[in-house]
Image: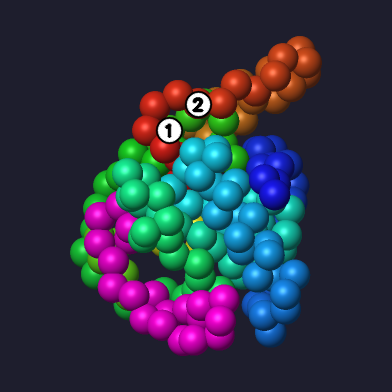
Amino acid sequence: MIREILHFPDPRLKQPGAAVKNMTADLVQLVDDMALTMYDAPGVGLAAVQIGIPQRIIVIDVNHEEPGKHLLKLINPVIIAREGEIIWEEGCLSVIDYTAEVKRAAKVEVKAWTPDEKEITLQAEDLLAVALQHEIDHLDGKLFIDRISRLKRELYSRRVKKLLREGRPLEARKGPPAI
Ligand SMILES: [Zn+2]
């Protein structure tokens, strides 16, 4: 089932996710729904917090040419090492019609659990490293616009609030898939 993605300024996006203690059948279903929702959007990543479920679960697939083949379903992901710096033009499924350059670690090592409760460690660089950092931020109640200048964030926030006040629907952004 495709779930509804929350959009800024929905306050639920600021609510940090709680660690998953055990994988129930409902959570396995939730992870599958998250993957469907991500491909449908389309986006390269989705965090449970973005569909209003405050749990530490993310899905990522940076290769949409072969959907499903490189799909990552990560439970309680934690960054255990970072290296270097990279500037990436980021967008987000929860931040309509906006992209901005964000500074991230160029390489990360992430520890997580799979839905069948295996512990894994991933090494990532480029878009995958950016997507992991972006999604784990969501689990901490943070959006990429919290990592840009206050002025830029205010301008974006004002634009969105004006659209909402006028009752105009927020249009999905065009361009490359959002994270
Ligand atoms: Zn996002």
Q: Residues within 10 Å of mark 1 (few under 14, many from 20)?
A: some
The residue closer to the viewer here, 70 or 159, is 70
The residue wearing badge 1 is 99
Camera sees residue 138: no
Residue at figure coordinates x 57%, y 76% from the top left: 115
Amino acid at circle 2: Arg
Magenta stretch? Answer: 110-131
Mark 2 and mark 1: Cα distance apart in space: 9 Å
Is mark 2 in CB contact (under 8 Å) with mark 1? yes
Residue at figure coordinates x 56%, y 26% from the top left: 172
Q: Residues within 10 Å of mark 2 (few under 14, many from 20)?
A: some
Residue 152 image position (x, y, % from top left): 48, 31
Residue at figure coordinates x 24%, y 69% from the top left: 83
The residue closer to the viewer here, 138 or 3, is 3
Left or right, residue 6 beside residue 100: right
The residue closer to the viewer here, 1 or 4, is 1
Residue 17 image position (x, y, % from top left): 67, 67
Residue 116 among those drawn in magenta = yes
42 versus 87 height, above or below: above
82 versus 80 height, above or below: above
Q: Earlier in the sequence, mark 2 or mark 1?
A: 1
The residue closer to the viewer here, 28 or 160, is 28
Label 1 CB, ligand 1: below 8 Å? no
Q: Secondary structure at mark 1?
A: strand
Left or right, residue 32 beside residue 129: right
The residue wearing badge 2 is 173
Amino acid at circle 1: Thr
Left or right, residue 71 beside residue 138: left
